[in-house]
Image: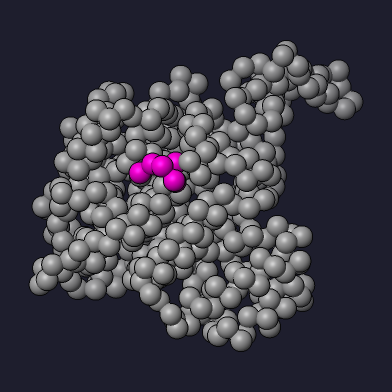
């Protein structure tokens, strides 16, 4: 980041002679940023920014979002190009290393991931400590955190090679952990990963296959899963990524940091959005109820919410949604799904909302969660697994952001400030006088 042409803004404290010139800094893309690091030292002031919506907590070269224009770039590459031409593991290499791999680098990277997909056999018995009806995200939090008890040879965060090995292990093992969480939940045998399958294919195999019969991965479904993973691989400094960075700023090991990210993602306001879409569709119940439901959404006196439409960051169309929309229709066509009430309802809701001026004026377009929920349901994933699948995809973004943070010489332990609004200093009163 560079100083923005020596421009600055000036803050003056009323009633005093205190003032501070705050330099403006420029990134490669995006608006100028005011460097307020000297604000407290010079003026004794903090800034107040609940949710950090106007605060840059770090420099990053990984992901750029322009919400007004509907732009998402991974390392400068538009998401549309990567979704059309790339694979998830190629995108993973890009996020981790900053550049797309050549053929030899890609082959080496793919093999590096494949060689780490198996879990330590003692982790298999670790699953037995959970109840059978445990939520998959609860299992993932526990098992990913437990990896730090098994891989002491890659815990030195100051060693680049150990960080690289940890990245391989996390990207490779999280799909196995998620698939086994599902198998444990439904009482089926665990399926071990296969080195002859691609990343998305292997996950579908471990999730759906059983030992009693052969399982053949449908290439259309494998491509759809690969797309879902690409589109969810990273999304700048969102809640879970910020959690990973904050945990990592303390020097915590990478497995603990990713477990923290999974816990943050579990929240329904973050990773549970596509699950909320299916819940909304269930509550609507039937295609004939869509007009009445949309009328309630428009009525300020009602509390109906249109889930899967609009986005906190994207004030235009979510660029990932356009890609996911086509994949959604490809999957439904490949599976020949007709007459499924929820899926029919979703398609009707999409059609009406896209042509309703109320939603057009408010830029409430379908987002990626709307279509991914429909795709995952069509592919046979229970809604309880939706957020876990999100975690599988986002792990590469988390570990890339974590690695960038470790290498950043300006990184300090995270320590947000506050406005204290509690009681002023007061003296203790003995209990018999209260």
> Tag count in the figure?
0
> Residue 107's image quarter?
top left
Q: Is residue 218 above or below residue 176?
A: below
In the picture, the quarter occupied by the C terminus is bottom right
* Residue in view at x 48 percent, y 75 percent: 343
Range drawn in magenta? 82-87
Where does residue 310 sit, x and y in percent of width and height? 63, 58
- Asked if residue 194 lies left or right of residue 73, the reply is left
- Asked if residue 49 lies left or right of residue 236, the reply is right
* Residue in view at x 51 percent, y 31 percent: 76
> Residue 49's image quarter?
top right
- Whether residue 221 appears in magenta in the rendering, the answer is no
- Asked if residue 3 lies left or right of residue 182, the reply is right
* Residue in view at x 69 percent, y 30 percent: 31
Asked whether residue 432 is in view, the answer is no
> Residue 333's image quarter?
bottom left
What is the residue that sits farthest to the right in this orientation?
Answer: 15
Where does residue 428 sit, x and y in percent of width and height? 61, 49
* Residue in view at x 36 percent, y 65 percent: 385
- Asked if residue 51 lies left or right of residue 384, the reply is right
Q: Name the magenta segment's main secondary structure.
A: helix
Q: Is residue 93 above or below residue 127?
A: above
Q: Is residue 241 above or below residue 57?
A: below
Q: How is the image coloured?
A: one colour
Q: Nearer the viewer, residue 424 or 186?
A: 186
- Whether residue 84 appears in magenta in the rendering, the answer is yes
Where does residue 327 sit, x and y in percent of width and height? 45, 59
Where does residue 315 sit, x and y in percent of width and height? 68, 50
In the picture, the quarter occupied by the N terminus is top right
Asked whether residue 49 is in view, the answer is yes
């Amino acid at each position: 980041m560079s100083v923005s042409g020596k421009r600055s803004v000036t803050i003056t404290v009323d009633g005093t002679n205190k003032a501070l010139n705050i330099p403006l800094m420029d990134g490669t893309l995006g608006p100028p940023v005011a460097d307020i690091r000297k604000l407290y030292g010079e003026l004794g002031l903090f800034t107040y920014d609940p949710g950090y919506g106007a605060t840059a907590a770090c420099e990053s070269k990984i992901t750029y979002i322009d919400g007004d224009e509907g732009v998402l770039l991974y390392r400068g590459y538009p998401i549309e190009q990567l979704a059309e031409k790339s694979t998830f593991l190629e995108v993973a290499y890009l996020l981790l290393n900053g550049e797309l791999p050549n053929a030899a680098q890609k082959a080496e990277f793919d093999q590096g991931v494949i060689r780490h997909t198996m879990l330590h056999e003692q982790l298999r018995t670790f699953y037995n400590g959970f109840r059978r009806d445990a939520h998959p995200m609860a299992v993932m939090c526990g098992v990913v955190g437990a990896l730090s008890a098994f891989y002491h040879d890659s815990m030195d965060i100051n060693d680049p090679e150990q960080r690289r090995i940890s990245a391989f292990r996390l990207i490779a093992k999280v799909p196995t952990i998620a698939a086994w969480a599902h198998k444990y939940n439904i009482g089926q045998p665990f399926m071990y990963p296969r080195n002859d399958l691609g990343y998305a294919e292997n996950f579908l195999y471990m999730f759906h296959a059983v030992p009693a019969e052969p399982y053949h991965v449908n290439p259309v479904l494998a491509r759809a899963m690969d797309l879902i993973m690409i589109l969810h691989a990273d999304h700048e400094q969102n809640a879970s990524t910020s959690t990973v960075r904050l945990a990592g700023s303390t020097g915590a090991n990478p497995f603990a940091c990713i477990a923290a990210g999974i816990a943050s993602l579990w929240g329904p306001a973050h990773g549970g959005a596509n699950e909320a879409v299916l819940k909304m569709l269930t509550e609507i119940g039937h295609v004939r109820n869509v007009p009445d439901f949309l009328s309630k959404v428009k009525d300020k006196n009602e509390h109906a919410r249109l889930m899967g439409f609009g986005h906190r960051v994207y004030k235009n169309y979510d660029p990932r949604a356009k890609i996911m929309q086509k994949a959604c229709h490809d999957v439904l066509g490949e599976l020949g799904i007709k007459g499924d009430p929820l899926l029919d309802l979703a398609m009707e809701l999409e059609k009406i909302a896209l042509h309703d001026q109320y939603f057009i004026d408010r830029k409430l377009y379908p987002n990626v969660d709307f279509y991914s929920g429909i795709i995952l349901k069509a592919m046979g994933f229970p809604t309880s697994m939706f957020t876990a699948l999100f975690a599988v995809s986002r792990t590469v973004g988390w570990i890339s952001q974590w690695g960038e943070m470790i290498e950043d010489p300006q990184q300090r332990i995270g320590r947000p400030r506050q406005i204290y609004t509690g009681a002023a200093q007061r003296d203790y009163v003995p209990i018999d006088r209260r």
